[in-house]
Image (tube, grey):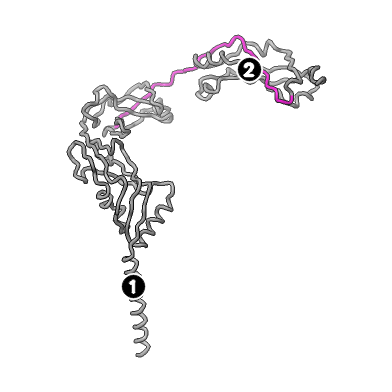
């Protein structure tokens, strides 16, 4: 019986100790400044165009949070675990904030907005202050209009299409939006390749001045015509050769080419006209690479020429060599030591 009494007393003491610590933690509030937060327009409402200080998102430079030390610790850990991510992203839904009618809403109370945030409340914290304290919100009504659909690549260049079905779609746009300004469809290189074979389905959209997009609710099927061959055959009648010698050979040896007619002969290429012109304007159309070991060769050396195509057009696939039994051409040469190299 006495043992049971002692156990009960110990349990009561432990319970009271834990209660005191919990109470102390709750009573001892801390503040914690948080940087790197962002307020973003909720774009889910298609019939309104909302901007914050004229933008789709604005930074909240500093939020001072207040709450129990343990809750502050939770926030610290959350931010520490994701150092490259925004500390918080708050989405502004103007309907929830009572800004339903189109117009300007200057002096929007950011602190009041943040205090209602579920992200803050679930940590059991309150917002003491924030910078900026106020923002200007603008709500513009959008109206549904029928717009023609136009295709573009990822660089914004228009694409020819074989068929777009339907050719026009309804999109929510500002009242000032011109009826001939198209709803856009952007196709990646992969999309274009696929659309040349079978139609692809995409959602047309318009882009507002601040970068927000409004998509049509109707998907369109797009077919791109087979690719036209942009490259044509050209014959570069005269090639100027250049010799690439390392520092150890320069000024000590000269290159004697025994088949110079072949080296300087006509070059057959496939290219766009612009790439062909750029190639003709290069200082050297062909290059012969000379290496240090060539000085030890007892006989005539045979080596393929390097075709000095402009790198920009090579990257774009706009120029290439026509491979034939005579191309790439092969130079036949030897190195002859200059007398001046023996008389420094």
Dot in front, 1 or 2: 1
Which part of the image, by quadrant, shows the N terminus?
bottom left
Q: Is residue 56 left or right of residue 295?
A: left
Report which quarter residue 51 is drawn in: top left
Q: Which residues are magenta?
A: 219-248
Q: Residue at x 24, y 23 (%)?
A: 179
Could you say which is closer to the camera, residue 240 or residue 314? 240
Where does residue 193 sit, x and y in percent of width and height? 43, 27
226 falls in the magenta region: yes
Spatial CA distance of label 1 from label 2 is 87 Å
Residue behind mark 1 = 20
Q: Residue farthest to the right? A: 343
Which part of the image, by quadrant, shows the C terminus?
top right
Q: Is residue 171 left or right of residue 275?
A: left
Q: Residue at x 44, y 18 (%)?
A: 228
Report which quarter residue 217 is drawn in: top left
Q: Is residue 186 left or right of residue 318?
A: left
Where does residue 77 sit, x and y in percent of width and height? 41, 56
Say the numbered circle drawn on residue 286: 2
Q: Residue farthest to the bottom? A: 1
Tell me the element at label 2. strand
Q: Is residue 316 above or below residue 203?
A: above
Does label 1 or label 2 sit earlier along the sequence?
Answer: 1
Tell me the element at label 1. helix
Say the numbered circle drawn on residue 46: none
Q: Is residue 197 above or below residue 338?
A: below
Q: Residue at x 32, y 33 (%)?
A: 211
Report which quarter residue 142 is drawn in: top left
Q: Is residue 18 left or right of residue 241?
A: left
C-beta proximity under 8 Å, tags 1 and 2: no
At label 1, counting other C-alpha atoms closer than 10 Å, the crowd grade (few under 14, some 14-19, many 20 or more) is few
């Amino acid at each position: 019986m006495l043992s049971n009494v002692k156990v009960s007393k110990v349990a009561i003491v432990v319970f009271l100790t834990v209660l005191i610590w919990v109470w102390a933690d709750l009573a001892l509030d801390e503040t914690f400044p948080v940087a790197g937060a962002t307020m973003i327009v909720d774009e889910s409402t298609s019939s309104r165009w909302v901007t914050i200080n004229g933008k789709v998102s604005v930074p909240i430079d500093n939020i001072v949070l207040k709450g129990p030390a343990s809750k502050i610790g939770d926030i610290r850990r959350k931010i520490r675990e994701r150092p490259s991510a925004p500390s918080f992203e708050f989405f502004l839904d103007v309907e929830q904030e009572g800004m339903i009618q189109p117009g300007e809403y200057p002096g929007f109370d950011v602190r009041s907005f943040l205090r209602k945030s579920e992200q803050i409340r679930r940590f059991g914290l309150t917002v003491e202050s924030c910078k900026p304290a106020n923002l200007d919100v603008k709500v513009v009504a959008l109206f549904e209009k029928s717009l023609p659909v136009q295709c573009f690549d990822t660089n914004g260049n228009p694409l020819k299409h074989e068929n777009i079905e339907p050719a026009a779609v309804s999109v929510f746009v500002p009242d000032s939006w011109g009826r001939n300004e198209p709803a856009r469809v952007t196709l990646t290189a992969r999309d274009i390749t696929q659309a040349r074979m079978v139609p692809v389905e995409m959602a047309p959209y318009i882009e507002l001045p601040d970068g927000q997009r409004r998509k049509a609710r109707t998907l369109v099927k797009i077919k791109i015509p087979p690719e036209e061959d942009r490259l044509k055959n050209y014959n570069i009648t005269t090639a100027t050769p250049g010799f690439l010698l390392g520092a150890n050979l320069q000024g000590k040896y000269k290159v004697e080419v025994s088949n110079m007619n072949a080296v300087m002969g006509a070059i057959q290429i496939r290219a766009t006209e612009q790439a062909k012109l750029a190639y003709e304007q290069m200082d050297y159309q062909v290059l012969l690479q000379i290496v240090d070991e060539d000085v030890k060769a007892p006989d005539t050396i045979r080596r393929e020429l390097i075709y000095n195509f402009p790198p920009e057009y090579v990257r774009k696939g706009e120029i290439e060599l026509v491979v034939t039994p005579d191309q790439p051409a092969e130079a036949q040469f030897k190195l002859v030591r200059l007398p001046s190299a023996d008389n420094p």
